[in-house]
């Protein structure tokens, strides 16, 4: 069977898409987009074009164009090397189909589309070749017989007809007999036989006991039937209640969350929160203006303001001080700037002092001449060190090249020369040490070693070097040492004079800039006084307090802030003085403004109250509390969706009948007791019927009984014939089922083996075996026991279901090769298993065309970018 591939999707008008086309890869295509990008729309578009649009009663599934216009689209498909265009637009019978062979341009009958897809229909397509999150969640209710039935339906040639014939046989058998039915033929015949038996029994007796016994038998039979029905119903109700009781915790949590969602009141969004905040801010602003206006109005009501009394008394002095206010403000600002600069300088001075102060002594910077002298001395000292090293190397070289003679009184001359070198080196090192004590000790030790070696060399009867060459080296060394000592002494004197003895002379030049800055800051701090302008400012402020006794200043206020307070008071007094004559007019104006503001405040309060009333709350605090509840409700929605998938609609309907778990448990206990009692009654009734039957048989006579017994025999013959027919139908149906199982039994192991390999790949060999029992599906790993689906996490359970579906699709791909569509089917997978699933889908794409629709950005980055379509 050739693989069918979809090469292009074109959506004329479908959901949010209008006149859009997408070219698909023949192996794997990935659609990537965020929520509401249209992924699920595209996933549902493919089966809609292949099998037909949903009816208009399912408007949510039809995805009619949001913007109106032409409804439908087309697929370009390839099968057996030929390309076809499948168009479906709005029309009768799930849409009008147009099928065109592109190579020839011929338009084919619509029925040809069914032949291209055969033997699959829409149900089998969605079962095998379509994967999404809701279908994966069905893994918890998946039964092995459902998987087996699916494999049987696709496992053998003509299996659909055999399954249909099996259904017909089972239907015919049910028409003949049902254990609890009334209409089937055998059930009716049994009813007729029971009536005939009753008539025979009635004809057998003429005695009152017989009549009474027959009546009792009839009543007992009716009671037994009722008891059988009641016991069956009680047992069924008991089983249902036990299941409901096990699901009560999930239902209880779901009910709480649902009530929270149901009790949600609109009007508490973030926009509503901002609107209320805007209203409250406006109200506070109006109230502030109202308070200020009321204060100003109360102040204006006095005939003469209190500050006007002081102004009238000290008017001349007031005007004189006011004339100096601007100048004094500038003086105050200058004082504050100087104080800030002084603090900064002091902090810098303290930092430099902490860095270079040693034992309370602070080094001083060099004069220009001493700075130059130190540089020269350091250069000279470096040259003397180099010269000392050169002379030492020459002495060693001359000693090695001179003639060697045997000594009579001393050790070999080489050792004496080596000791001389060590002594001179130690002397030279000591001369450059910063501490005087270290210099003296090092010089004494070095001279002692050198003198000892020199006199030993002189005492040798035969010298290894010529005497004039040794004398010349010694003269040069002594001269070099004297020069080095002179340089060191000069540096020591400079270090003592400038307080730098604790530092290496090589560092003196690098810190001169900091020492100059430190000395400069010290002079500036010492030269700076206590800001004499402060006395002028304080005297000026004191004069103002004399003129205006009500003027008070806190200790924390700066001079500029105090002068600003004075300026504000002066402005108010001058304003009051200018407006004193128009007090009446001002009061009138203020009262009018106060009335206007009061009206605005009332209207604003009314708006706020109306806003709150529209949302069913009385205060802003209650509104904010409800907003918080709404935020919590959004968090609960995720849990609500998860719990909703764990309970069916029937579960919710039955659980809703009970207010508490205790009530459910009480009902369960009641039904258990009632079931026990009914079963006891049933047993008693059976015993009673047996006793009655024995009595009636003993009372039977040979009167009218013969004709009735002939009718009974004929009826029994018909019943036996129908029973044989019923059994033959049942046997034929079972035989067909077994034959289909035999026809497909070679595929089930292959599917399980392939699913096990895929599951091991996804879980990295955590689970490697799958077992189908009569009641459940189980998996196992090397380190884990057999686990049922109910014991797995949701992610692992869904991965198991994906592996089974992919295995079925791959095994059946030899005869059924439709594209595999996956719509965000791996949202519960972790990152590692999503990556392994991407690798697995790449392998599947070699057999089946894979169309993956995902919102996972990481998955979109890992796929081949040539196979990626971003929505």
Image (cartoon, helix red, strand yellow):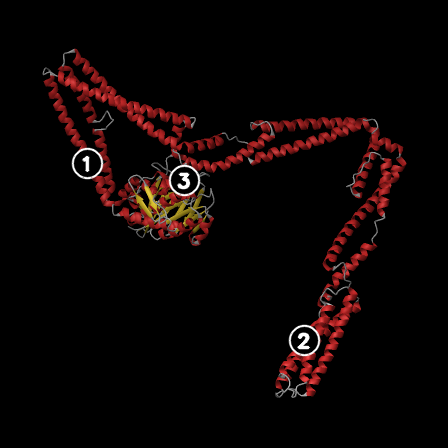
Q: Which residue has dot 1 on it? A: 731
Q: State if disc 1 and disc 3 touch (CB < 8 Å).
A: no
- Residue 484: which disc? none
Residue at 84% x, 40% y: name it.
Answer: 541
Front of the two marks 3 and 2? 2
Q: Where is residue 600 in the image (x, y as percent from the top left)?
A: 68, 28
> In the displayed structure, does residue 98 sit left or right of residue 188?
right
CA distance for labels 3 and 1? 51 Å
* Nearest the eye: 4 or 642: 642
Q: Is residue 551 above or below residue 457?
A: above
Q: In which quarter of the image is residue 720?
A: top left
Dot 1, crowdedness within 10 Å: few (<14), some or many (≥20)? some
- Residue 425: which disc? 2
Q: Where is residue 177 in the image (x, y as percent from the top left)?
A: 21, 28
Q: Which is nearer the N-term, disc 3 or disc 1?
A: 3
Query: Which residue is at the far right?
Result: 316
Q: Position of residue 311 (x, y in %)?
A: 86, 33
Dot 3, crowdedness within 10 Å: few (<14), some or many (≥20)? many
Dot 2, crowdedness within 10 Å: few (<14), some or many (≥20)? some
Q: Which is nearer the N-term, disc 2 or disc 1?
A: 2
Secondary structure of residue under mark 2? helix
* Nearest the eye: 639 or 823: 639
CA distance for labels 2 and 1? 119 Å
- Residue 71: which disc? 3
Secondary structure of residue under mark 3? loop
Residue at 76% x, 56% y: name it.
Answer: 349
Secondary structure of residue under mark 1? helix
Q: Quadrant of residue 669?
A: top left
């Amino acid at each position: 069977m050739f693989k069918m591939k979809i090469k292009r999707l074109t959506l004329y008008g479908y959901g949010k898409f209008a006149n859009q086309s997408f070219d698909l890869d023949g192996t794997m295509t990935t659609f990537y987009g965020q929520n509401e990008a249209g992924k699920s729309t595209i996933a549902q578009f493919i089966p809609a074009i292949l099998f037909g649009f949903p009816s208009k009663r399912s408007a949510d599934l039809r995805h009619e164009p949001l913007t109106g216009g032409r409804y439908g689209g087309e697929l370009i498909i390839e099968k057996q090397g030929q390309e076809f265009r499948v168009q479906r637009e709005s029309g009768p019978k799930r849409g009008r189909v147009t099928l065109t062979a592109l190579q020839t341009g011929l338009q084919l009958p619509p029925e040809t589309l069914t032949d291209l897809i055969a033997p699959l229909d829409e149900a089998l397509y969605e079962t095998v070749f379509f994967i999404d999150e809701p279908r994966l969640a069905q893994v918890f209710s998946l039964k092995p017989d459902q998987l087996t039935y699916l494999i049987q339906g696709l496992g053998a040639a003509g299996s659909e007809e055999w399954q249909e014939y099996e259904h017909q046989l089972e239907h015919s058998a049910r028409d003949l007999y049902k254990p609890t039915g009334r209409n089937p033929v055998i059930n009716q015949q049994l009813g007729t036989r029971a009536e005939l038996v009753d008539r025979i029994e009635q004809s057998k007796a003429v005695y009152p006991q017989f009549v009474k016994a027959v009546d009792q038998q009839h009543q007992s039979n009716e009671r037994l039937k009722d008891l059988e029905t009641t016991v069956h119903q009680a047992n069924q109700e008991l089983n249902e209640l036990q299941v409901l009781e096990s699901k009560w915790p999930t239902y209880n949590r779901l009910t709480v969350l649902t009530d929270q969602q149901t009790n949600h009141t609109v009007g508490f969004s973030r926009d509503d929160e901002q609107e209320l905040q805007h209203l409250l801010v406006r109200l506070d602003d109006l109230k502030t203006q109202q308070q200020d206006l009321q204060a100003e109005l109360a102040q204006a009501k006095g005939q003469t303001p209190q500050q006007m009394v002081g102004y009238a008394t000290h008017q001349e002095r007031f005007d004189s001080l006011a004339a100096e206010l601007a100048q004094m403000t500038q003086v105050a600002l200058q004082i504050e700037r100087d104080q800030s600069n002084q603090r900064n300088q002091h902090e810098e001075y303290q930092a430099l002092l902490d860095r270079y102060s040693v034992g309370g002594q602070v080094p001083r910077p060099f004069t220009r001449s001493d700075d130059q002298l130190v540089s020269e001395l350091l250069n000279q000292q470096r040259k003397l060190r180099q010269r000392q090293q050169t002379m030492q190397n020459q002495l060693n070289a001359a000693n090695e090249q001179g003639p060697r003679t045997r000594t009579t009184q001393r050790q070999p001359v080489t050792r004496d020369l080596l000791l001389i070198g060590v002594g001179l080196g130690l002397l030279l090192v000591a001369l450059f040490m910063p501490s005087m004590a270290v210099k003296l000790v090092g010089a004494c030790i070095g001279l002692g070693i050198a003198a000892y070696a020199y006199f030993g060399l002189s005492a040798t009867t035969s010298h290894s070097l010529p005497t004039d060459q040794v004398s010349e080296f010694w003269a040069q060394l002594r001269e070099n040492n004297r020069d080095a000592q002179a340089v060191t002494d000069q540096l020591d004197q400079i270090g003592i004079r400038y307080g730098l003895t604790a530092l290496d002379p090589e560092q003196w030049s690098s810190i001169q800039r900091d020492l100059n800055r430190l000395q400069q800051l010290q002079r500036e701090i010492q030269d700076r006084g206590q800001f004499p302008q402060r006395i002028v400012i304080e005297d000026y402020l004191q004069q103002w307090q004399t003129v205006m006794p009500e003027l008070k200043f806190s200790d924390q206020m700066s001079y500029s802030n105090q002068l600003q307070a004075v300026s504000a008071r002066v402005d108010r007094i001058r304003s009051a003085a200018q407006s004193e004559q128009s007090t009446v007019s001002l009061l009138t104006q203020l009262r009018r403004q106060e009335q206007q503001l009061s009206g605005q405040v009332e209207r604003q309060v009314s708006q706020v109250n109306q806003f709150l009333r529209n949302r069913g709350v009385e205060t802003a605090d209650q509104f904010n509390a409800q907003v918080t509840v709404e935020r919590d409700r959004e968090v609960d929605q995720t849990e609500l969706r998860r719990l909703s998938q764990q309970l069916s609609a029937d579960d919710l309907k039955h659980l809703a009948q009970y207010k508490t778990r205790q009530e459910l448990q009480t009902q369960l206990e009641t039904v258990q007791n009632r079931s026990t009692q009914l079963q006891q009654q049933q047993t008693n009734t059976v015993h009673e019927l047996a006793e009655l039957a024995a009595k009636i048989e003993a009372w039977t006579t040979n009167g009218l009984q013969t004709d009735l017994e002939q009718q009974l025999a004929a009826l029994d013959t018909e019943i036996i014939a129908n029973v044989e027919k019923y059994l033959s139908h049942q046997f034929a149906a079972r035989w067909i089922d077994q034959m289909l199982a035999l026809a497909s039994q070679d595929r089930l192991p292959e599917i399980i083996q392939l699913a096990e390999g895929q599951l091991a790949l996804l879980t990295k060999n955590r689970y490697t075996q799958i077992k189908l029992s009569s009641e459940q599906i189980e998996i196992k790993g090397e380190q884990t026991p057999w686990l049922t689906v109910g014991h797995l996490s949701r992610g692992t359970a869904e991965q198991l279901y994906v592996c089974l579906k992919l295995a079925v699709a791959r095994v059946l791909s030899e005869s059924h090769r439709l594209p595999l569509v996956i719509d965000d089917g791996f949202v519960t997978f972790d990152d590692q298993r999503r990556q392994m699933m991407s690798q697995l889908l790449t392998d599947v794409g070699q057999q089946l065309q894979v169309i993956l629709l995902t919102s996972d950005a990481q998955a979109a980055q890992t796929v081949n970018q040539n196979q990626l379509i971003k929505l």
